[in-house]
Image: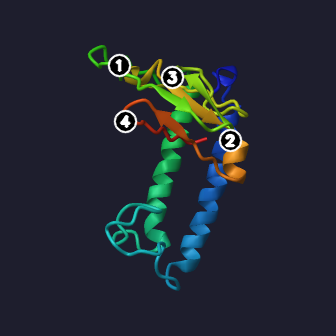
Amino acid sequence: MDEEFRGDLTLLEAAGNDLKESLELYRELAALTDKTYLYANSMQTPQRKIPFPNGETFVRWMQCLPMYEKEYEAFEGHLEEMKQGIFPKEEEPDESAEPLKEGKFRLLSKNCETFRVEKGASVFSDYTSPIQNLIPEITGLTGIRFGLGESIQTGVTVKIELEEDSMVLLGYMNS
């Protein structure tokens, strides 16, 4: 959550309303298709991951409904806790963890830039999306960021030149 919104639960309350409406519509879908439509998934195998792992267990839309209801109940429960002033606690850093050693590299992509990986640093060059939490092992390393807009519109290729054989850590996030 952006620092400017910390303690402001209006966005979460609005999201809760949207989530509730979505759940109600899903209940209608599940009821309409319960006896007439098979397969809430396209792959009926244990390897399937969407909408839930194990395509053999979640075959019909109705079988997925309890999972969505549980998710909504958890959201509402956590929102109620936050309204009472009970917020998630930040994890204490593991002092025994060794920081990762940074490999030297040269950034070749002109549409990208480097930044110091730390709490509060934005992961995109054209959109405020600050890092909320990270493990001590990567704090202080050099990250590479690019424009969110460009990545959505055309995709982004990140090219680097390493001075020596190195491991490259790729980070993914929900934005």
The local secondary structure at tag 2 comes to helix
Q: CA distance from mark 4 to mark 3?
A: 40 Å
Determine whether label 3 and label 2 are within 8 Å by CB.
no
Judging depth in this view, the residue of 141 and 89 nearest the camera is 141
Query: Does 68 sit left or right of 125 as displayed?
Result: left
Q: Earlier in the sequence, mark 1 or mark 4?
A: 1
Mark 1, Cα crowd under 10 Å, few <14 / some 14-19 / many 20+, is: some
Determine whether label 1 and label 4 are within 8 Å by CB.
no
Q: Number of marks in the image?
A: 4
Residue 80 seen in the current view: no
Query: Does 173 sit left or right of 43 as displayed?
Result: right
Mark 3, Cα crowd under 10 Å, few <14 / some 14-19 / many 20+, is: few
**Of the residues shown, which amino acid type is indicated by label 1?**
Pro
Q: Earlier in the sequence, mark 4 or mark 2?
A: 2
Query: Does 51 sit left or right of 45 as displayed?
Result: right
Q: Earlier in the sequence, mark 1 or mark 2?
A: 1
- For discs 3 and 2, the disc positioned in front in the rendered view: 2
Residue at 34% x, 72% y is: 45
Q: Earlier in the sequence, mark 3 or mark 1?
A: 3
Q: Specify the farthest residue to the bottom.
A: 36
Residue that mark 3 sits on: 86
Residue that mark 4 sits on: 167
Give the image location of residue 137, x and y in percent.
Answer: 37, 22
Give the image location of residue 17, x and y in percent.
Answer: 67, 46
Residue that mark 2 sits on: 148
Which of the image's four quarters has the C terminus? top right
